[in-house]
Amino acid sequence: MAKNLTSTDKLNILLWVMKDITNNLSRDGLLETFRAIIFDSLKLNKLLLFVKHQSLWSVEIKSGVEAEGDDINVQRDLSGINTITFIDSADNDVFKGFDFIIPLIKADEPIAYVIVGDSSENEEEGIASSIRNLHFVQTLAMIIVSTIENRRMQELRREMEYASRIQTFLFPEKHILKNDNRLSLSAFYLSHYQVGGDFYDYAYTNPNNKDEIYFCIADVTGKGISAAMVMSNFQASLQALVGRIEYLPDLIRELNKIVIKNSNYEKFITVFLARYNFETHVLRYVNAGHNPPVMYNFKDNEKSFLTVGGQGVGMIDEPALSEGVVTLTSDTRIVCYTDGVCEIEKDGIEYYGQRIIENRTVTAETISDTISQIVSDLNITRENNLLSDDATLLGIDLFVR
């Protein structure tokens, strides 16, 4: 039969729980503490604990029951229960053997449900004792579930911070391509979350030959850890292949096979990849579904877009791809960007970001000024709550001598 706890009993139980938390008892240990309180201190003998993790519900404790509760579907059977509720199993057979549903509500949303039962012989007296303890059970469950969730979030934050630090090492270091009389380069990256799915890269195609460079910007569908993992694999593959496969459509096709193998068509990547030869002044590129970079010829005061290419990487098995070829005749600026920049709106103006990119490409004095002015004009900062995606810019001035 359920026990009616005194104030002293409740205080001692709370001290017990807080001591376990202070001593950093494990998740399983805290759940066992809760189970022990329900069974040993409150003398209830059936317990189910459902906890929500992100959007999924899982059974964290199932004790004192066999098949009872197996058919409970949280969204179907518990949705809308926001207060402690007496169970009439005649209304819903899935709750047979249980007496009360105790919801845990945080920010008007359920984060857990405790379902308890007392199968004592004197049912009425048992239920009466249970009722007097229900709010205390609710308080205890909230303390323990919240503690476990807070620890999980802290661990997730630590993992995200570590992943963010790792990701910063994946971007090229500035000294790889030094600004000189042949080129000037600038880049910017801001992830929407701590890690993101945007990427840029640049280097000499062959470290032993300074006559040719490659540069690339890419964007994985989605954001966060999953996008970052796909992108890091893509980057490693690109760097392994770029010096071995000269024809860019063939290189993109090889990358396409790798992405499909690793993501099973669940992620795709838009990519702009280019090579530039300082001796011939020939720019070769493939735009695989990416936002077309802006190219500006200083001498002719002419703006154009690098659009030749084909489908994004990871979308289909055999993408149709073409290579764009441009011979530069005078100093030229190229600004690459992801949709997190060009799709920024202001005062209801769609693609306001695109307008700023094109304007600053033409008007800014240096490539460094171009990138910094775009970032400033569009307020691409952590404090800007209107940003909804990763934001990346890669700009290069090529000086034809």
Image (spheres, grey):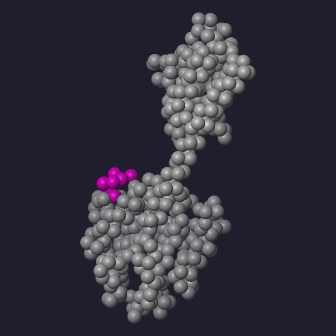
| Count of number-bearing discs | 0
Judging depth in this view, the residue of 133 and 338 nearest the camera is 133
Task: Judge from the rendering whether residue 87 lies leftward or rightward of residue 303; answer left or right.
Answer: right
Q: Residue at x 58, y 26 (%)?
A: 34
The quarter of the picture where residue 116 lies is top right
Residue 287 magenta: no
Q: Residue furthest right?
A: 7
Judging depth in this view, the residue of 374 and 156 nearest the camera is 156
- Residue 67 locus on image (x, y percent): 45, 19
- Residue 293 locus on image (x, y percent): 45, 75
- Residue 185 locus on image (x, y percent): 47, 80
Q: Is residue 341 above or below residue 94?
A: below
Q: Residue furthest top?
A: 121
Q: Is residue 198 above or below residue 78?
A: below
Q: Assign the C terminus to one quadrant of the image.
A: bottom left
The quarter of the picture where residue 199 lies is bottom left
Q: Is residue 197 visible to the viewer in this orientation of the structure? A: no
- Magenta-highlighted residues: 259-266
Task: Judge from the rendering whether residue 80 lies leftward or rightward of residue 71; answer left or right.
Answer: right
Judging depth in this view, the residue of 339 and 238 nearest the camera is 238
Q: Is residue 398 above or below residue 21?
A: below
- Residue 142 locus on image (x, y percent): 63, 33
